[in-house]
Image: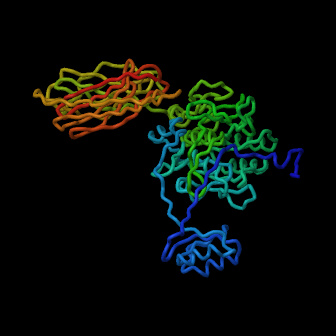
């Protein structure tokens, strides 16, 4: 019978709120000749000695595992398999890094957009209070700080995989392999409060929370829970909150249900997170209740795993570190725990779920950081795009207002003039109340002439900004064979949060002087665009056009331009 304490079964402990696992292995001695390098698993000291006696060279002696890696003749290795003291003999194969992928959850909460804006969480500290972290994982090593074991294991290394998975969601390194986290340069600290079986006592978890607060860490990420709480656990949560820690906790996997948020998520000083799937629906397993403050991706999330690997898991456990990584970025910018918590809720995206399911809404990292997070003021920002539809006397100029800088509206326009002179001509002013692309047509230009232009923004609060100057050349009066749009197809990838289209195109020019291909997504005006430089007599490609929270009918236009300024366009209408 399990031990009890204050009427609570010792096994009524906090469980990980996560999902399935997967493992792979290596083998293959059949047909091997000459010397081989093998991993030998042995049952006893006698087995180890037998393996070493056959080795020409000992490559590695493991500290805790009953394994030795050695080089030996292939025939000797095959013979070891028959020894009753040997568990297995397998080739020591090679593991290769996967190219970095962008998990759907990171994309959905726009963390990748925040990365491109320079937001990395550098300077913040995240305590992953879980089953530990794989300290050798190539996607986590550069971000690892301290660790401490509270489970009695004697090491904070992850023997389960759950903690490593959560760590990668919150803060995997943005490199050329594996995955990328919501934050990418915060410091991860491993508080092993759950054993390798995925469970731990209330006291272990409370001690881990106390440790995170005493170390001065910014965020405590708790992807764990129980159906009931204890005063000791609540005391620890309150202590961390009062000492500046933002405690983020998974709501639990008791769904479908109502008013079933677990503990510690149900405590007022913990930020409770529910789970959504890729279509923005509530995950079937997600707990719900009035305590929910935010929703975040939790269904089928791909992230780091033990053994330097990667795995796909589901659970509110996966939702929690999405929010933890976002909070770290805000606190790296100077926000307090309460400011970060409020900013995350103020900027969340309403995805149409009940308040007991989504709280304030779905986590939106880009919006939270654009709102300043209490640490740094946002800045007005505009960039110059490209010139399209360039002819002998006219062109279309484009720009992008990337941040209103906190203003209610911004006036945008273009300055332009012949290269080498002042930009003394301007287009009509357009007033924008949201960030996005804009364009304007100019005419009465001179043929076969270089022109410079730049985008300019003037905010309602007095701030101004201008993009860098861009050059284009009008075509001569003579004429050549113009280019042609050979194909245009659109794959509708829209969901509840985005009007999103994958546009495939092919173009050609008999003269072999292709110059550029411009794509535009428009309703009453252009909402997104892209330009690709091309050359030769034919080209093809694929680009994504999208509008956040967009709906209805859109015109998708592809325009091809040759080096003489001749153009051809094709438009198709699609619906989100």
Q: How many numbered circles are shown?
A: 0
- The percent position of residue 260, horizontal first and vertical second, equals 75, 33
**Is 219 situated left or right of 226 in this image?**
left
Q: Is residue 148 above or below residue 86?
A: above
- Work out which residue is located at the far left of the displayed protein and give it: 478
Of residues 276 and 168, the one nearer the viewer is 276
Give residue 428's quadrant in the image. Answer: top left
Q: Is residue 63 visible?
A: no
Of residues 570 and 237, the one nearer the viewer is 570
Q: Is residue 22 above or below residue 420?
A: below
Taking the spot 30% from the left edge, 22% from the top edge, the residue there is 440
- The percent position of residue 280, horizontal first and vertical second, equals 57, 30
Q: Is residue 88 above or below residue 234?
A: below
- The percent position of residue 559, horizontal first and vertical second, equals 28, 28
Of residues 472 and 61, the one nearer the viewer is 61
- The percent position of residue 513, horizontal first and vertical second, equals 18, 37
Q: Can residue 340 be seen in this view?
A: yes
The type of colouring in the image is rainbow
**Is 362 situated left or right of 102 in this image?**
right
Taking the spot 27% from the left edge, 31% from the top edge, the residue there is 486
**Is 206 situated left or right of 471 in this image?**
right
Of residues 444 and 372, the one nearer the viewer is 444
């Amino acid at each position: 019978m399990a031990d009890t304490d204050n009427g609570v079964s010792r096994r009524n402990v906090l469980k990980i709120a996560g999902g399935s696992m997967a493992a792979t292995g290596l083998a293959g001695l059949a047909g091997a000749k000459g010397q081989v390098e093998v991993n030998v698993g042995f049952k006893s000291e006698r087995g180890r000695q037998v393996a070493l006696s056959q080795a020409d060279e000992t490559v590695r002696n493991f500290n805790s595992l009953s394994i030795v890696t050695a080089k030996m003749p292939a025939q000797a290795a095959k013979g070891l398999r028959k020894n009753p003291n040997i568990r297995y003999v397998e080739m020591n194969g090679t593991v290769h890094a996967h190219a970095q992928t962008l998990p759907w959850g990171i994309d959905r909460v726009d963390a990748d957009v925040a990365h491109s804006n320079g937001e990395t969480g550098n300077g913040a500290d995240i305590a992953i209070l879980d089953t530990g972290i794989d300290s050798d994982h190539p996607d986590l090593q550069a971000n690892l700080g301290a660790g401490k074991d509270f489970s009695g294991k004697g090491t904070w290394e992850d023997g389960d995989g759950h903690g490593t998975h959560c760590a990668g969601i919150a803060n995997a390194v943005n490199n050329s392999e594996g995955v990328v986290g919501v934050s990418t340069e915060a410091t991860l600290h491993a508080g092993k409060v759950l054993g390798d079986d995925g469970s731990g006592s209330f006291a272990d978890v409370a001690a881990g929370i106390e440790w995170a607060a005493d170390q001065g860490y910014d965020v405590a990420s708790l992807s764990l829970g129980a159906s009931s709480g204890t005063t000791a656990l609540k005391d620890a949560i309150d202590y961390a909150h009062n000492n500046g820690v933002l405690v983020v906790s998974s709501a639990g996997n008791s769904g479908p249900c109502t008013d079933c948020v677990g503990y510690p998520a149900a405590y007022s000083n913990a930020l409770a997170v529910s789970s959504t799937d890729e279509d923005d629906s509530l995950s079937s397993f997600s707990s719900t209740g009035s305590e929910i403050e935010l929703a975040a991706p939790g269904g089928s999330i791909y992230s780091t795993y033990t053994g330097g690997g990667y795995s796909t898991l589901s659970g509110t456990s996966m939702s929690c570190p999405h929010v933890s990584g976002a909070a770290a970025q805000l606190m790296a910018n100077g926000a307090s725990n309460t400011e970060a918590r409020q900013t995350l809720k103020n900027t969340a995206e309403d995805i149409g779920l009940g308040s007991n399911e989504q709280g304030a809404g779905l986590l939106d990292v880009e919006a939270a950081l654009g709102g300043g997070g209490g640490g740094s003021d946002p800045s007005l920002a505009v960039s110059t795009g490209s010139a399209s539809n360039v002819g002998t006397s006219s062109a279309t100029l484009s720009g992008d207002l990337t941040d209103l800088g906190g203003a209610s509206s911004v006036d945008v326009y273009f300055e332009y003039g012949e290269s080498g002179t002042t930009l003394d001509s301007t287009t009509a002013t357009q007033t924008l109340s949201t960030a996005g692309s804009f364009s304007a047509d100019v005419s009465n230009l001179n043929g076969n002439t270089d022109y410079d232009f730049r985008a300019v923004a003037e905010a309602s609060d007095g701030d101004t900004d201008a993009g860098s100057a861009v050059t284009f050349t009008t075509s001569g009066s003579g004429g050549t064979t113009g280019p042609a749009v050979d194909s245009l197809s659109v794959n509708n990838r829209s969901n509840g949060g985005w009007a999103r289209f994958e546009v495939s195109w092919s173009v050609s020019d008999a003269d072999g002087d292709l110059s550029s291909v411009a794509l535009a997504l428009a309703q009453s005006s252009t909402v997104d665009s892209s330009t690709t430089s091309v050359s030769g007599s034919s080209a093809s490609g694929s680009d994504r056009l999208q509008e956040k929270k967009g709906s209805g009918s859109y015109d998708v236009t592809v325009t091809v331009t040759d080096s003489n300024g001749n153009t051809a366009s094709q438009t198709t209408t699609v619906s989100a």
